[in-house]
Amino acid sequence: DEHGWESAHTVIDIVTDDRPFLVDTVTARIAEQGCTLRQVWHPILTVARDADASLLGLAAEGTTESWLSVEAHPPLGTSAAERTPDLLAALREGLAASRAVDEDAAALRGAALKVAGQLHAAGVPEGVQGRPEEVGELLTWLTEGHFEFFGYRHHRVEDGRFVPDPETGLGLLRGAEAGFAARLPGQDDHALLVVTRDTRRSPLHRSSFLDYIGVREFGPDGAIVGEHRFVGLRTPSAL
């Protein structure tokens, strides 16, 4: 009534800069909260805004925005008011993740290609399992539309633990607090490439466990000294 209309459903309205994965991210986060989707509207508009970000109107040379509106039902036996705090938190997390990944998209792909180039140029100590040129070719192939890169960060090994280099973080792995639950290197672990799954689901795009790709660095004695860590989701062409 406050806004001049009413609905029997939960209505979520989002206005944000247009970027990849918005609809998938929002609908997946809503579904994770146990809600049932009823309708989704997603016009993409080019608009003009003033210095305070107030809407001035449509404009041919303005900013491209996604205007997303979703109707959903809360889970049976619960009210919309009960679900609202968790739903809003999940949506904010997903939208923040999609923005971070979009802002770093070129840098994420560049990081993978840089590591691939380093692998082609450098050898590995005896006893390391894996051929650098093959791992480099795999990384290059993944950048060709076979993997959605959502995060990257370099880690060094100290006292048997991976320690992040925060300044290298991109996308979901920005900042020192961005963690990952993969196993630590064992004393007899000599794999150049590690491919596994995180225990966390992706906060953007589809609701799947994140894929993790680790490219290890070794010292002259064959000990692990670092790791290039990528997280994301394989595309259908890589499944």
Image: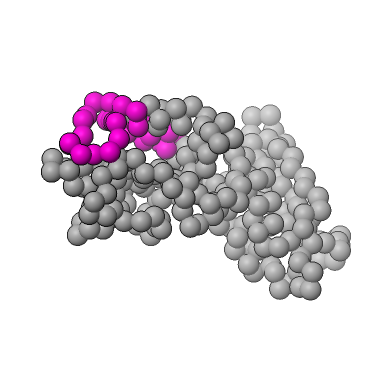
Chief SS of the magenta region: helix
Q: Which residue reaches farthest left?
A: 221
For residue 234, above or below residue 157: above
Q: In which quarter of the image is residue 11?
A: bottom right
Residue 211: percent from left, percent from top = 48, 46
Residue 177: percent from left, percent from top = 38, 60
| Residue at 17% over, 36% down | 126
| Residue at 82% over, 61% down | 9
Q: Can residue 129 be seen in this view?
A: yes
Q: Specify how the rendered protein is coloured.
A: one colour
| Residue 144 included in the magenta stretch of the image | no
Q: Is residue 49 visible?
A: no
Q: Which quadrant would the N terminus be assigned to in this image?
A: bottom right
For residue 216, above or below residue 145: below
| Residue 123 included in the magenta stretch of the image | yes
Residue 115: percent from left, percent from top = 32, 33
Is residue 221 or residue 118 the one in the foreground? 221
Left or right of 130, for residue 178: right
Q: Which quadrant would the C terminus be assigned to in this image?
A: top right
Is residue 113 or residue 43 the one in the foreground? 113
Q: In which quarter of the image is residue 159?
A: bottom left
Q: How many marks?
A: 0
* Start-end of magenta stretch: 106-135
Left or right of 148, for residue 57: right
